[in-house]
Amino acid sequence: MTDYKFSPIGYVHSAYKEKFGIPRQPGLVNIPATIEIETAFSNDEAFRELETFSHIWVIFVFHGIEQGSNSKWKNMVRPPRLGGNKRVGVFASRSMFRPNPVGLSVVELESIERKKNKIIINIIGGDLLDQTPVLDIKPYIPYSDSVTSARAGYAVEQPEPKLKVSFSEQATSKITVAEDQYPMIKKIIEQILQLDPRPAYLADKNGNKKSEYAIKLYDYDLIWQVIKEEIIVTDLKKVK
């Protein structure tokens, strides 16, 4: 067998500072992010005509995976889409725990700009952890990449928002301040939480019990509770 060695062409800068809370597929939350291209690859000619495409494929490395037994790939996994109750083959899933931890996401290309000696690609709708290494970028071509007759197995339809999201007075006040720097932060919070980012086994067992969770978003800790079928955002704490 031949081993292959790749060097990242760039790194993602996103609001997602940890895996918990990241949408399970791209395009579910309209959140902005950037791909900062390394200097060695920031040649304007290498990106010529890319802005004529509305979307791009991002090929990346799953990083930030915990070390230990849970980080080892297995033949069978439990997809969240099936409630964590059914096993499928790892190659019939998009699990990050795979023989080669490589991911693929299609995102909206907003713009391309140059800052000093680096090219910055502005994207929308990514499901990418902050500092994700990017191996390659390719244009999304609708006539070949969108297959109208395709079957989607157990992932037939886009997940619908599951829970109502409301905000406490304290959270509302802090979000208003945060909007000076992140104008879309309230809408982003709603989109993330409506999809219920909790692991399936927790979502099923909580029932009427009040449970508190936290997500690292931008430079904040987002604190929220689940009460029955409603999520209440209780605080937005600035990370020091």
Image (cartoon, rainbow, N blue to C red):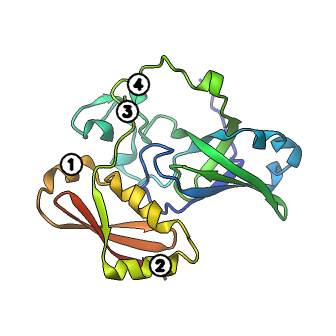
Q: Is residue 20 visible?
A: no
Q: Find out whether the residues at labels 2 and 1 contact each other: C-beta distance under 8 Å.
A: no
Residue at image point 84% right, 65% down = 116
- Gap between marks 4 and 2 measured at Cα: 40 Å
Which numbered tag is attached to residue 152? 4
Q: Position of 44 compared to 230: left or right?
A: right
Q: Position of 45 compared to 139: left or right?
A: right
The residue mark sitting in front, 4 or 2, is: 2
Q: Find out whether the residues at labels 4 and 3 contact each other: C-beta distance under 8 Å.
A: no
| Mark closest to the chain's N terminus, 2 or 1 | 2
Image vertical order of residue 160 relative to residue 172, above or below = above
Mark 2 is surrounded, within 10 Å at the Cα level, by few (under 14), some (14 to 19) or many (20 or more) other residues, namely some
Q: How far across and how far down the image is residue 31, in percent?
A: 53, 56
Q: Helix or strand or loop: what does disc 4 sit on?
A: loop
- The residue type indicated by label 2 comes to Thr
| The N terminus, quarter of image | top right
Q: Find out whether the residues at labels 1 and 4 contact each other: C-beta distance under 8 Å.
A: no
Q: Quadrant of residue 83?
A: top left
Question: Which of 113/215 is in front?
Answer: 113
Question: Which of 125/221 is in front?
Answer: 125
Which numbered tag is attached to residue 176? 2
Residue that numbered label 1 is attached to: 201
Q: Position of 156 compared to 112: left or right?
A: left
